[in-house]
Amino acid sequence: MKQLFILVAIIIMTNFMFPAQSVCYAQENPMALIIVDENLGVIPSGWEYAFELRREEFVAVLADVFDIAPEDMDSMELAEIIDVYGEPWQINEIRSIADTYYTKIAALTDSTATFSELIDSIRSFAADEFIIDMIFILHSNGTHILFSDGYFSVATIVESIQVLDIPLRALYQTCCYASMAIPTWEICGISAVNGSNQVNSYVLLSPIWFTKCWLEGMPYDSAVYAAYQKEIDSISTYETVFPEITFMLSEDVRESSAQNIGGILPNILWTDFYSQIADFYAKPQQLELDIFPNPFNSSCVITAPSGAEIEIYDLRGNVVVATPFDADASLSPLIRGTDERSAGGASRGFIWQPDESIPSGIYLVRARTMDGQEMTRRIIYLR
C-alpha cells in the first residue's frame, strides 16, 4: 500500500520540488513570464479510472500533497480536486523555478484564464519593454484554444499580437493537437514554439520539467524533448507495481503526445535574449523598412534606406536572396529599384518576385545600413 501511495503521488500529482537556482542573468530588457493554466473540468479518462478504482488511497495521497484534510475532498470528483488544489500546485512549482529568472510573472487560472486577460497581460508587459515568454496549460483542438471565456482561434490570438506590434520570444504549451498551429504562431515572428502531434497525455510534469531544463541551460528544443521524456520515465519507473498505468506508456499514447518544434530560433537558449527582440524597443526611428503588399502572391515592393543591404531568409535561417547580388542575373528574384526621397532621407525600392522554387510561407526581410543599424520585418508569401 505504501508503494501505491508513492506511485499515485508521482503519476497523478507528483510532489516533485524543483528548487530554483541562485543564478540570475542580466540583460538589457527585463523578462516576463505569462502562465495560463486551466483544465475546465476535463481530465484524462485513464486518470478518472484510477481515481474510481483507488479513491480512498488517492484522497489520502492528494491530502498529503496539497496539505489539506481528506474530508475536504469527500464530495469532490477528481476534476474538481485538480481545479481547486492541483492547478495552484502546478503554478507554484513553475514559480518556484522561474521567480529567480523573471522580473515579473503573471499566472492566469480559473476566472482570470481568459483571452482578454492574456492580451491585457501581454500589452502591460510590452508597455514596460519586457521580453515575454509564455506557458499554456490549456485544452485545444489544434486551431482553437479553450480559455475560461470560450474557444479562441490561434489565428485570432496571433492577429491580436500583430495589431499590438508586440514581440513574443517563446511559448511552451501542453495543448492537444498544438503542432497544427505552429505555422500560425510563426506569423508573429515567435522565436520558439512547441506542439504535440495529437492528444497530449503528458501534461502534468512536462511544463515544470521544461521550465527547469530551459532556464538552467538547455536549448529550447532540447528542453521540450527532455520534458516529454522525463514524464514518460516517471511513469515507466512504476509500471510493474501499478499495471493500470501501462496505457500511458503505449506507442499510440507516446506518438500522439510526441512534440514538434517551430519558430525562428527553435534552439534558442533562455540566456539568448535575441537581439532582434531587444532591438525592437530601441530601434532607431530614422531607419525605415516597408513592404507592400503584405501578404502578397506574386511580387512585393521592399523600401529600405539607400545603400542598405537586404537579406530575405526563411524561418530556418536559410538566406533566400540577398544584396549585393549579380545585377545581370536574368532570374534574380530581387530587382533593383530607383532612389526616392522619404521623411527619413534617401531610400531605395526593390521588387521581390519569387520564382517557382520558392514555396509559400513566412519569410524575414532584414535591412542593414552602412552604419550598422538593422531592422527586420515579417513577410507572408501566398502562391
Image: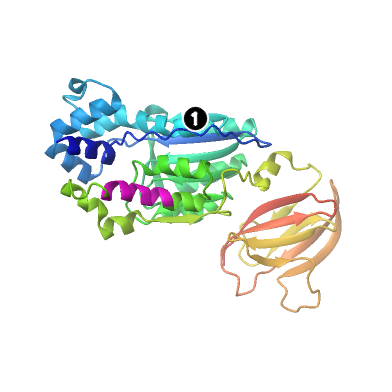
| Left or right of residue 52, residue 85 in this image | right
Rendered-image quadrant of the N terminus? top left
Where is residue 11? Give x, y as percent. 27, 41
| Left or right of residue 279, residue 111 in this image | left
Color style of the picture: rainbow
Provide the major secondary structure of the magenta segment: helix
89 in relation to 48, above or below: above
Q: Which residue is mark 1?
A: 106
| Residue drawn 16% across the image and 42% down it | 49
Q: Which residues are magenta?
A: 226-236
Rendered-image quadrant of the C terminus? bottom right
- Dot 1 falls on a residue whose secondary structure is strand
Question: Furthest-front residue in view?
Answer: 2
159 in relation to 20, above or below: below
Magenta span includes 227: yes
Nearest the eye: 367 or 150: 367
The image quarter in which residue 291 lies: bottom right
Where is residue 129? Give x, y as percent. 65, 34
Question: Can residue 115 be seen at all in this image of the molecule?
Answer: no
